[in-house]
Amino acid sequence: MTIATVSGYPRIGLNRELKKAEEAYWKGKISADELQATAKDLRKRHWTIMQEAGLDHIPCNDFSFYDQVLDMACLLGCIPERYNFPGSKTVDLDTYFAMARGEQTDKRNVTAMEMTKWYDTNYHYIVPEFAADQTFRIASTKIFDEFAEALEAGIKNARPVLIGPATFLSLGKPKDEFAPMTLMAQIVPVYIEILKRLQNQGAQWVQMDEPCLALDLAPGAAEALTLAYDEITASVPGLNICLNTYFEGLRENTALTFSLPVQAVHVDLVRAPDQLDACILEAKKTGKILGLGLIDGRNVWRTDLEAALEKAGKAANTLGTNHVMIGASCSLLHVPFDLEIEKGHLDEEVYEWMAYARQKLDEIVTLAKGVADGRDAVAAEIAASQAAVKSRRESPRLHNLKVRARTEAVDEKMLTRENPFSVREDLQKSALNLPLFPTTSIGSFPQTPEIRKARAAHKKGEMAEDAYQAAMKKEIETVVRFQEEIGMDVLVHGEPERNDMVEYFGEQLSGFVFTKNGWVQSYGSRCVKPPVIFGDVERPAPMTVPWSAYAQSLTDKPMKGMLTGPITILQWSFVRDDQPRAQTCAQIALAIRDEVVDLEAAGIAVIQIDEPAIREGLPLRDADRAGYLRWAVDSFRLSASGVGDKTQIHTHMCYSEFNDIIDSIAEMDADVISIETSRSQMELLDAFIEFDYPNEIGPGVYDIHSPRVPDVQEMVRLLEQAASVLKPEQIWVNPDCGLKTRGWEEVRPALKNMVAAAKTMRERA
Ligand code: GLN
Ligand code: ZN
């Protein structure tokens, strides 16, 4: 038999039921029991879907109320002291949510644990905290309960999913100076206890996720992994372990991975198709079952089943059909739930090219059947897949000759401003006439309920174009007057007309479609609905010019035009997979370039191109990073370099630490960059001790992710810190990020204080 399986299934539900139930629970509108009942119902529904699709192994414990790393931390008893959690009990739901979100009640006043991106996805996980004297113990029964629940629901081959010990340790942050991998000896006994319990409950297989094997291994990790798995497998004879890797190829870790004493190894053949032969060879040598991740778990396109079956057949020929497992490249958590729901909403042709999680199950089962019973057994499915692949490949809507010719004609000159920054600087200074420590904001102002209501009504056609325009203009005027009143130097229009910084542009560019229900979990109850880029990208008409020109007409101060950059648009979309991402990015860059040039022509002298996502696109392997940074930086430069020297280009970055790519950020050659720093106490500035940042920079002094209003002194202190490593002429004064999630009652005093802080610095200079 050829095993059909997946590493995980979306947990939020077809209609985001989990999100809604969780948020209701947090607001006190439903009880814990009601929340648990919804969760139980969702799990059962999802298992049933997988069973009915015909999967042989069905994951369980891939469900989570927040994220699987936090679940693992609870399972292993890794609960930081501040949650004041008694050492003998199992973690209760409220402690669990306190760890994820913080808690401010009479019972407890604690901050949340840190959250960061799950490898190179847009999904986030809660970062485990390790103390040097960290101990581990089973502190959650979730995995056992869910396995029992699956059995009870009649799911025969339920396969509990765990994050493996090496990956779990690699994801955590030590509180003191020590390498987390040194905790392996303490953590392994707890894993053994967990696996024994699962085996006693009747588990035949468990899935251990060890994506760290597909990355550059930390020093000592190889030895630690070998010791750990030797001990684990010796302690639970008879239990089959499937070691799961994803998001990259095993490369130099291939032999190590297959040498571990497990029954099966799953590899990602979408991200790293070239590793197939090496993996077949190693699987043959070590007698293992090879898990083939042939279906893309990170994107929404239908699989070319003919090509995939050929690869699977190659593995089966060498290993035997019963030594091959078919799956998605990674958990299906990263794709939306069921395409069916888009019928009638999504562009009909594009619909035929796509597959969500539910459709991907069918592809997996088809492939497994094809391997076991031969191609003829699945001839109809393959024909349908071929037709879809062909229709997509040959669709005239994919290709725009004009765009192709333009991207091919891009040369060094188009990537470069007329003169170097040293020349531009003086020209801009005299054109803009700004004081030292100039103040500005990142773009958006509070998105009030009235703004949201007007936008929604306009979208539904319930508000006439004229009325909508008037409402937005009124908003813009309010924002402009406020900034003038408090004495800001470079103004913004406030972005009231934008629902989302990517969607707003995508909707006006060709080559994009928008789904109705393509939700993907980002973290906890938060979901995102990425646009789908299916074809060549072009800008048919100006996208922001009328708004910015109107805003500029209201004031004599410089009005900053606001755009989203090409890398961020790429990074936050489902991207076509029939050409390199770099090429799609260059097309988007040209579209943004056109907008930049048009803004300049309309009299906008300062233009910001936001690139908050530049860091998260960084490849997971060191060896690949330089290549990515090259095309990413070039795309930004392409978008920004069409203007004259006097026009000042800004960019903005947030959500990550940037110290390790600071030289690439400098290469982007934006005249001014605003960058998130206030929460990390200006950790960023460490980078400038060594690195002489050439252009101007505004390290954020107001943490907009918190409802707190910072006082003048606090911001002066942050600016003093900045002034200790940067020249005063280089420093801008601005918040960390856009203000759209904040209320006016916080923004008003905070920005007033910010302007006062800038004045203090100016007077001293
Ligand atoms: N200009 C955007 C805003 O102010 C930037 C948002 C972001 O960086 N995520 O909302
Ligand atoms: Zn930001």
Image: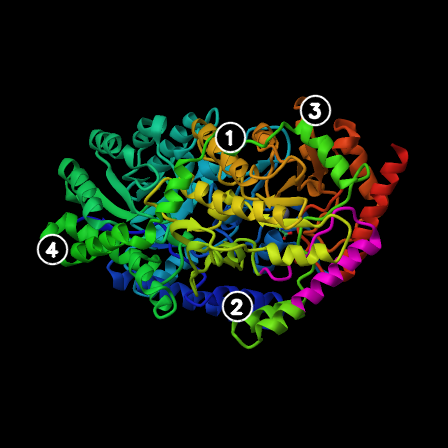
Which numbered marker is on residue 689? 3
What amino acid is at disc 4?
Ala
- Residue 52: horizontal and vertical position, in percent? 26, 64
Is residue 212 or residue 441 the one in the foreground? 441
The residue that disc 4 covers is 377
Tell me if mark 2 has few (under 14), some (14-19) or many (20+) residues whose alpha carbon lies within 10 angstroms of its own. Answer: many
- Which of label 3 and label 4 is nearer to you? 3
Contact (Cβ within 8 Å) of mark 1 with mark 4: no
Residue 197 relative to residue 503: left or right: left
- Residue 589: horizontal and vertical position, in percent? 49, 43
Is residue 141 or residue 408 the one in the foreground? 408
The residue that disc 2 covers is 21
Element under disc 4 = helix
What amino acid is at disc 2?
Ala
Is residue 212 or residue 185 the one in the foreground? 212
Work out whether mark 2 precedes mark 3 in sequence or the reverse, and give the earlier one.
Answer: 2
Tell me if mark 3 has few (under 14), some (14-19) or many (20+) residues whose alpha carbon lies within 10 angstroms of its own. Answer: few
The residue that disc 1 covers is 413
* The stretch drawn in magenta includes residue 491: yes
Work out whether mark 1 precedes mark 4 in sequence or the reverse, and give the earlier one.
Answer: 4
Q: Residue at x 69, y 56 (%)?
A: 493
Residue 46 relative to residue 548: left or right: left
Magenta stretch in the rendered image? 471-498
